[in-house]
Image (cartoon, helix red, strand yellow):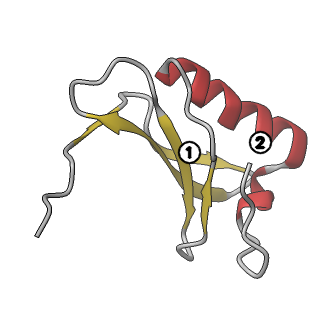
Amino acid sequence: MAKKPKLEHSELAGEFTDDGITVLVDISRPAGADGGWSLEVISEDDDVTTWEETFPTDEEAFSEFLATVAQDGIRSFLEAADPAVH
């Protein structure tokens, strides 16, 4: 059985609340890697939105999350029927 790679989580990862809605922002990369930060947003109902591309820095990943919230609203992460992939 292959071991699951260890992940390093960004200090920017964590809960984010806007408009009374809280989501978990997960920004991570394989431990010891340079760059290649993954971005995933998980709603309270376990709806998961995952970006296909990786980001050179965790700050860029978090900025992309904030830009999505500003453009589409935090409620855009609550639609599970048609999972969004950015």
Cβ atoms at labels 1 and 2 below 8 Å apart: yes
Identify the residue at horizontal 53%, vertical 73% (top origin): 46
Type of the residue with mark 1: Phe
The Cα atoms of the two marked residues, 1 and 2, are separated by: 10 Å
SS assignment at label 2: helix
Label located before the other in sequence (1 or 2)? 1
Classify 76 as above or below 66. Answer: below
Judge from the rendering whether residue 83 lies leftward or rightward of residue 49; answer left or right: right
Judge from the rendering whether residue 85 lies leftward or rightward of residue 30; answer left or right: right
Query: Looking at the image, which residue sits at the far right?
Result: 71
Residue 10 locus on image (x, y percent): 37, 30
Identify the residue at horizontal 60%, vertical 71% (top origin): 47
SS assignment at label 1: strand
Type of the residue with mark 2: Val
Q: For the image shown, how many numbered marks are present on the structure?
A: 2
Specify the label residue 38 is tagged with.
none
Query: Looking at the image, which residue sits at the far front?
Result: 1
Task: Please name whichever residue, 1 or 47, is drawn nearer the observer in this view of the structure.
Answer: 1
Location of the N terminus (image quadrant): bottom left
Quarter of the figure with residue 22: bottom right
Quarter of the figure with residue 63: top right
Identify the residue at horizontal 49%, vertical 39% (top origin): 38
Q: How dense is the environment of label 2, judged by Cα within 10 Å: few (below 14), some, or many (20 and up)? A: some
Identify the residue at horizontal 58%, vertical 29% (top origin): 61
Task: Please name whichever residue, 48 or 37, is drawn nearer the observer in this view of the structure.
Answer: 37
Residue highlighted by disc 2: 69
Residue 3 locus on image (x, y percent): 13, 58
Specify the label residue 16 is tagged with.
1
Query: Looking at the image, which residue sits at the far bottom?
Result: 81
Classify 34 as above or below 28. Answer: above
